[in-house]
Image: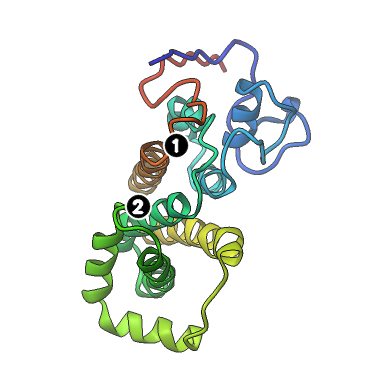
Amino acid sequence: MANTEIPDGLPILSRGKHRNPRRGACFMELASVLASERWSDHPACTHPVLAELARSVNDHTSDRHRGDLLPLVPSVIGLRGGGLSWVVDLTAAVALQALPEVSESSMRALVAGLLRCDEFAAQLPSGSVPHAAAVRRALDDRPRAVTWARRLSGGRPITTTAFEKRSAPGVMACAVRGIATSATSEADCDAQLRELLRVGIDTARAGQPAATPERLGGPTASVRYHR
């Protein structure tokens, strides 16, 4: 595994979008710098769904602990996705990770997302969505939430484009918000959010096609950061 060091002089991780590095950097803006791309919080080096998760975790993590996300920044570089099954599995993994930690209202929204994952997993080749069985178990364990979600959707199917552009990013945001509003303390919230992002990155990496260049670093990459 390659080591990636964050050079001296780069901006401090901070909340929100920044016009230039002098004003700070969010997680994905720093990734754009490390990937040698133009300054952006939507860089091409990372799939939009995973980038949505990273941005949301960054913004909901406290200033005190946001620096703990730094070792994960290099590991999103090169994770550009591997088709519908990749997005479905990533979405499922993040929703499943957050599900036990959130309030009932957030849980229902995540179940709605898992229902979409279950629908698409049933149409994809067997084994292409590793979290499919866990999704089915989670839905079976929450019949009332499933009934609510089915009533909300009216049984209407969605296109793969709608899932990738709206549903999957919505699940990322809902998982993060759900944890942020349910955690018992700042430290607990920050730890849960960091673990949520780590689960997302690990799932994305596991499903990444071999032909796609891998990230520059990983969760254990050597990162040096100077404030």
x, y percent for residue 203 = 37, 43
Residue 183 visible somewhere in the drawing: no
Mark pair 1, 2: CA separation: 12 Å
Residue 49 visible somewhere in the drawing: yes
> Disc 1 on helix, strand or loop?
loop
Farthest residue in the right direction? 19
Say whether marks 1 and 2 touch (CB < 8 Å).
no
* Residue nearest the viewer, comparing 132 with 142: 132
Q: Please give left or right for residue 152 compared with residue 137 in the image.
A: right
Farthest residue in the front direction? 125
x, y percent for residue 130 = 30, 52
Relative to 32, does residue 186 appear above or below in the rendering?
Answer: below
Farthest residue in the top direction? 8
**Amino acid type of the residue tagged 1 in the rendering:** Pro
At 51% across and 45% down in the image, what residue appears?
A: 50
> Disc 2 on helix, strand or loop?
loop
At 37% across and 71% down in the image, what residue appears?
A: 111
**Amino acid type of the residue tagged 2 in the rendering:** Ser
The image's colouring method is: rainbow
Mark toward the start of the polypeptide (1 vs 2): 2
* Residue nearest the viewer, comparing 209 with 32: 209
At 30% across and 58% down in the image, what residue appears?
A: 126
Q: Name the residue carrying label 1.
A: 209
Q: Quadrant of the C terminus?
A: top right
Q: Quadrant of the N terminus?
A: top left
At 43% across and 14% down in the image, what residue appears?
A: 2
x, y percent for residue 184 = 32, 55
Q: Find residue 183 and report its image quarter.
A: bottom left
- How many other residues sit within 10 Å of disc 1, few (<14), some (14-19) or many (≥20)? some
Q: Name the residue carrying label 2.
A: 128
